Image: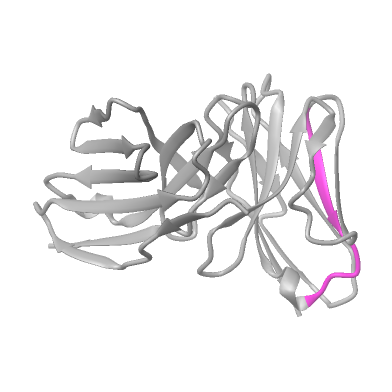
Amino acid sequence: GAGVSQSPSNKVTEKGKDVELRCDPISGHTALYWYRQRLGQGLEFLIYFQGNSAPDKSGLPSDRFSAERTGESVSTLTIQRTQQEDSAVYLCASSLGSYNEQFFGPGTRLTVL
Amino acid sequence: RKEVEQDPGPFNVPEGATVAFNCTYSNSASQSFFWYRQDCRKEPKLLMSVYSSGNEDGRFTAQLNRASQYISLLIRDSKLSDSATYLCVVQDSGYSTLTFGKGTMLLVSP
């Protein structure tokens, strides 16, 4: 069956521009997570959705970062006024529920010039 | 702040070797533990959950020591395809997100 998909796979942008990253979770998965992985670093949690609500957004690094989820399906992560330190791979994961195995998408590699 | 600490490696071992990774976590209330595997420039994938009694899946054995807040992964008879970064992952009680260690890199050579 289809796994978690993310788009775009790669995004190069100029400092100060806004970017939008998309995640399509596995169908039926109610929980959705966004992580960030900088080069050579571990995964940093950004935000968690249960259904369309976000009970935990404690990992968002600044108010330039926001995310939403609609229809208990697709989620978008928006980064406004991008900075060079935002360069990273942004990974999305989904799970059947918050206690189940998380399945990761292939990630979006963001490069801010 | 929740911490999960791992030796970053790399661990360089020949095929057929046995290798062990360790991980420590800071929150004594943590309830669930996992090992994920991440290949170079790929997404993480669940390798195995770690149970209090210890568990084995083929060549892989995971153990948990709650008193020492320590998790281990043992790989026997290493294969070239085992080369990857192994991520120690901890989940606290109730609902909570996963906290990932930075990973231990394993390189298995012919």
- Residue span colored magenta: A73-83
Residue B60 picture quarter: top left
Q: Where is A62 relative to B78, above or below?
A: below
Front position in the image: B86 or B95: B95
**Residue at (67% x, 23% y) in the render:** A29
Q: Where is A4 relative to B53, above or below?
A: below
**Residue at (32% x, 38% y) in the render:** B65
Pick out the residue farthest to the left: B16
Q: Position of residue A64 (x, y in %)?
A: 89, 61
**Residue at (65% x, 40% y) in the render:** A5
In-image side of A58 versus B30 (left or right): right
Q: Quadrant of the C terminus of chain B?
A: bottom left
Residue A1 picture quarter: top right
Pick out the residue farthest to the top: A28
Q: Where is A107 relative to A11, above or below?
A: above
Q: Where is A84 relative to B80, above or below?
A: below
In-image side of A71 versus B26 (left or right): right
Pick out the residue farthest to the bottom: A113
In-image side of B93 versus B12 (left or right): right
Q: Quadrant of the N terminus of chain B?
A: bottom right
**Residue at (52% x, 50% y) in the render:** B100
Q: Position of residue B90 (x, y in %)?
A: 50, 41
Q: Position of residue B41 (x, y in %)?
A: 49, 60
Query: Residue B106 in magenta?
Result: no
Query: Residue A80 in magenta?
Result: yes
